[in-house]
Amino acid sequence: GIGPFLKPLHPHGRTRMGWDLAGVFLLVWDAMVLPPSLAWDLDMTPVDTASSFLFGLFWLAFTFWSVDLLLNFHTCIYDKGRLVSDRSRIAKRYCGTWLLPDIAILSVDLATASMSSSANSANTGNLRVLGLARGLRVMRLLRLLKMTKVASILEDEIAGTGREWIVLLIALTKTALSIILAAHMLTCFWYWLGRTISEGGGISWLEICEIRHVQAWVQYLHALRWVINAPAPADIHASSGVERLFDIFQIVFTLCVIGSAISKITSTLSELRLVSSEDTLRRREVRVYLQRQNCNFELTGRIMRFVDYKLMRKTLNPLDTSLISDTLQMELYVSQRSSYL
């Protein structure tokens, strides 16, 4: 029947989670491809293999986010800790949060495609219109803010499994990905800044480093090297105040990113250490007891292995029922005993 399809999706259900994960991949792709396409002024019109590939992915992403907009009206929400499936309340929440940004970004995508097509087909050198169309595509990066929601859901799901190494791996992966994306965007912006100054008749770092007319991937490596470890003294012309300002901003921004990354990893390790501290204490008490009883090495090893096994299979601490409502307590009770009903 069509009943299941008419029922709003659970925000943590497999269908919605799978859809959100696909959205994360598209967001990461946008964050990796959009900055260089703007910095190096890459055309989206399908005239060769590379541009045709970008053109196809552009419309794939546009279709995905158009469906995602409609799907947000079909997904349950949480209100004060309670799952809400009422469509009017779902629509009200979405209209007050992401609806307008989603519509604006989709409109920018359509405008970008339309303006790029008209500027190229007219063959009148309308570079101003084409430049505006490409500049508007920066708004698509606003969707990166949605990654925090999916990341928090994944962390909650993984933390519930009790596998501490996966929690740490996810934290390290997310931190590394954030640093890579930040460095990538700064790299592209640094090249774009130099190209803009050069095209305006000024002397930029591209001329000083003599890479104005080399291959694009070599230019990217030079810009990336600058972002990772800027040369001292900086290869910036004395009259280039904009480049000097970016150099200062990049240093401050790098310090903030690295500090945030270290803080995130440290807090994750502290949480894992807190979770495992009770098990470590109980394990130490058993070992101290065995030492006082003068147990031989072989028996001590067998006992400690069994202790490790029991600690891994131990039941969770008793639930503090004051933290959840009576309705949720009843649903939990039924869920625990559903196999016997």
Image: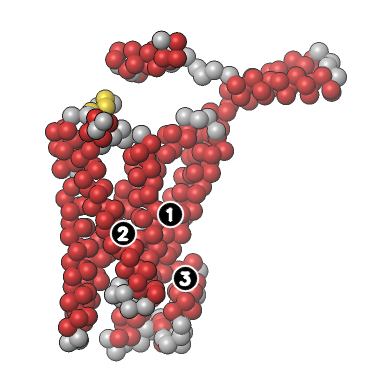
Q: Is residue 35 above or below residue 102?
A: below
Residue 226 visible: no
Q: Does the CB distance between marks 1 and 2 fall below 8 Å? A: no
Disc 2 marks which residue? 60
Q: Quadrant of the N terminus?
A: top left
Question: Which numbered disc flags the more N-terminal residue, 3 or 2?
Answer: 2
Q: Report the Cα–Cα distance between label 1 and label 2.
A: 24 Å
Question: Which numbered disc flags the more N-terminal residue, 1 or 3?
Answer: 1
Frontmost of labels 3 and 2 is 2
Q: Which mark is residue 224?
A: 3
Question: For this rendering, which residue is in front, 2 or 242?
Answer: 2
Q: Position of residue 264 (x, y in %)?
A: 46, 45
Mark 3 element type: helix
**Quadrant of residue 27 within the rendered picture:** bottom left
Q: Report the Cα–Cα distance between label 3 and label 2.
A: 29 Å
Amino acid type, callout 3 = Leu
Question: Which numbered disc flags the more N-terminal residue, 1 or 2?
Answer: 2
Amino acid type, callout 1 = Ser
Q: Report the Cα–Cα distance between label 1 and label 3.
A: 15 Å
Classify residue 85 as left or right of residue 26: left
Q: Residue at x 40, y 53 (%)?
A: 25
Disc 1 marks which residue? 178
